[in-house]
Amino acid sequence: MNAFLTISEAKHLDARDSLYSLREKFHVPKLQKEDCIYLTGNSLGLQPKGVKEAILQELKDWEELGVDGHFKAKNPWMPYHEYFNESLAKLTGSLKTEVVAMGSLTANLHFALASFYRPTKQRPMILCEKKAFPSDRYALVSQLEMNGYSENELIEVSGSDETGVPNDNEIINAISKYGDRISVLLIGGVNYYTGRLYDIDKITKAAKKKGINVGWDLAHAIGNTPLNLHDWGVDFAAWCTYKYLNSGPGSTAGLFVHEKHHKSKLNKFAGWWGHDKSSRFKMGKNFNPIKTAESWQVSNAPVLSMAAMRASLDIFDIVEFKLLREKSLVLSKALMDMLDHLKLETGENIEIITPREDKKRGGQVSVKFANRDHFFFEQITKNGVIADWREPGTIRMAIAPLYNNYQDISRLEKVLYESLNQ
């Protein structure tokens, strides 16, 4: 094999990487005592080594303090969700009052849509992208139905290429065409299938000009791409934290609501943790919402789950996100260049469906091995590659710059080459 990147070259490049040591803060799964090639941080991030200590601290406080842990724990549980506002604000380009750690992704989308999907006879429609993540589509169709409308009022913007995923201009053209009939827009900031990064600013502005409420699913964007939700004028956004934010399976999600809506009389599902803090425990019968994104909360914080999330965000807090983004782009480009080289070396039909331009992608590279089926994926898995298979015939490989490196790419090339030649 004429390697694109030898292991010695990879080690030399890693030695020059100022972020290389951050990998030591994570547990990497092993195969025969060697680190696996972990490329599925877009599905579940690796466990930070600080997680165990963080959870054990909460267990210790629960053991020793019982209910008094709400006030006397090392990290008191009563305001526990507030420990995340600053970190999440930095990652989303928001004010601290505009973000809240709460719920789960699809539940948070429902909470937000209850406020921002306000259909009228003139504006009954919802717009999303074709090949949106299925859970988003389920949520949108159910919102339509609960408001007395049919699935016909869901505009799914198709793309002109073979993936069916639209680009920025195709979405903006649909906004221009249907805008006067659209109540709310919800799009994935990074498409889960192709890894396409949308121009959130440009699309948001186009939709706002048409009077549309604008929401974004940032599951594949937060911790992966730069965000500036406040200045972009996004109305709401939601995300999970177990992908690039490494907070653990099913961990607590997040919600953004722009400050311009904090004092508005929007419909919302009310719960006591969204009630004004100074009078919450007076147990009054009328809901008095907090004048921040916290008013969309309904319940108190799931402390044990959030402890893991805090351990991960502690790592993000010590590194400049600009550097993570730069490393993500450089490594993902190297991954694409390696796949191009492998195609030439082997004559295999390998097609990268992720946009190659830096501004149009995150760290994910989606690739089709056209002449291979799931057996090929099983082969590379047996050889230590942890990636992700998506029908039809697509392997998603994600660069998570906190722990991926050039050695991963060099080792991946070897495994792919050997598996293609079996």
Image (cartoon, rainbow, N blue to C red):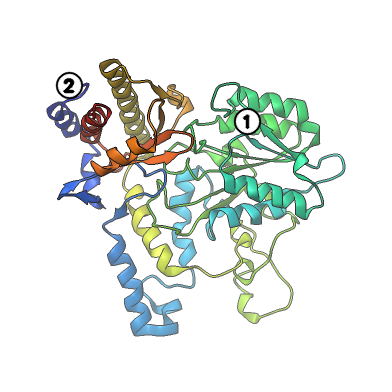
Q: Residue at the spot x=39%, y=57% of the render?
A: 248
Q: Residue furthest right?
A: 121
Q: Quadrant of the N terminus?
A: top left
Whole-angstrom CA distance, mark 1 to mark 2, is 45 Å
Q: Residue at the spot x=59%, y=69% of the render?
A: 273
Residue type indicated by callout 1 = Ile
**Image-quadrant location for residue 183:** top right
In the image, 310 versus 13, the foreground residue is: 13
- The percent position of residue 122, horizontal first and vertical second, equals 86, 39
Q: Quadrant of the C terminus?
A: top left
Q: Residue at the spot x=52%, y=52% of the render?
A: 96
Above or below, 25 against 152 in this view is below
Q: Circle 1 sits in a helix, a strand or a loop, which is it?
A: helix
Asked if residue 236 can be seen in this view, the reply is no
Asked if residue 45 can be seen in this view, the reply is yes
Return the residue at label 2: 1
Q: Residue at the spot x=78%, y=48% of the render?
A: 118
Return the residue at label 1: 203
**Image-quadrant location for residue 404:** top left
- The percent position of residue 43, horizontal first and vertical second, equals 42, 46
Above or below, 305 against 240 in this view is below
- Count numbered badges in the picture: 2
Dot 2, how many residues are within 10 Å of its Cα: few (below 14), some (14-19), or many (20+)?
A: few
Q: Circle 2 sits in a helix, a strand or a loop, which is it?
A: loop
**Image-quadrant location for residue 20:** top left
Relative to 50, 362 lies left or right: right
- The percent position of residue 155, horizontal first and vertical second, equals 71, 35
- The percent position of residue 126, horizontal first and vertical second, equals 72, 41
Residue type indicated by callout 2 = Met
In the image, 90 versus 157, the foreground residue is: 157
